[in-house]
Amino acid sequence: MIRCRLNHLEARCRQRGYTLEQVRPCIASQDGDQITVDETHPAYPAKPKPGVSLVTRAANFARSAARHVAAGMPRATDEQVAQRFAICQTCEHFDGRACRQCGCPVVRERKFVSKLSWAEQSCPVGKWGPVSS
């Protein structure tokens, strides 16, 4: 059993790569902002698999960035980024912030550092592919 304040539980969930919503079914009791969570509950999220190392993440990002530049830096639309993001959110390799297969950050916004916004990129496990402009 875990006994802590709600804000500490939220932080603990983020650190472990899952959301408070995933843990809610496992709350055994709540007294004000004090919460008791049953870690043995069948719905309690499994520990996420370890991600890729910093060196591997950097190498993967460098390869992806080089491909992106070589392709002329095509950008996905907001709708395409949202579709890719929705797929990533349901993936077993998504830890809430990044992909545990390639290490890339997974963000919905069309940012330079987001592979989701680079039109020619694809998912490392084949769940989404390049988009045409």
Image (cartoon, rainbow, N blue to C red):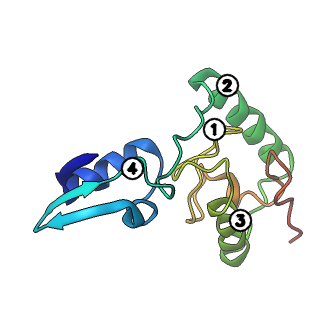
Earlier residue among tags 4 and 2: 4
**Residue under numbered circle 4:** 14
For marks 4 and 1, give the CA distance: 17 Å
**Residue under numbered circle 3:** 87
Q: What is the residue that sits farthest to the top in this orientation?
A: 55
For marks 3 and 1, give the CA distance: 16 Å
Q: What is the residue that sits farthest to the bottom in this orientation?
A: 79
Earlier residue among tags 2 and 1: 2
The residue located at (70%, 27%) in the rendering is 59
Q: Is residue 46 left or right of residue 71?
A: left
For marks 3 and 4, give the CA distance: 20 Å
Do tag 4 and tag 1 residues touch (Cβ < 8 Å)?
no
Helix, strand or loop status at disc 4: helix
The residue located at (69%, 52%) in the rendering is 115
Earlier residue among tags 3 and 4: 4
**Residue under numbered circle 1:** 103
For marks 2 and 1, give the CA distance: 8 Å
> Considering depth in this image, is 47 or 112 the residue closer to the camera?
47
Q: Position of residue 64 (x, y in %)?
A: 76, 40
> Considering depth in this image, is 5 or 3 the residue closer to the camera?
3
Q: Position of residue 77 (x, y in %)?
A: 71, 73
The residue located at (58%, 31%) in the rendering is 50
Q: Residues within 10 Å of mark 3 (few under 14, many from 20)?
A: some
Q: Amino acid at mark 2?
A: Thr
For marks 4 and 2, give the CA distance: 23 Å
Q: Amino acid at mark 1?
A: Gly
Q: Which mark is residue 56?
A: 2
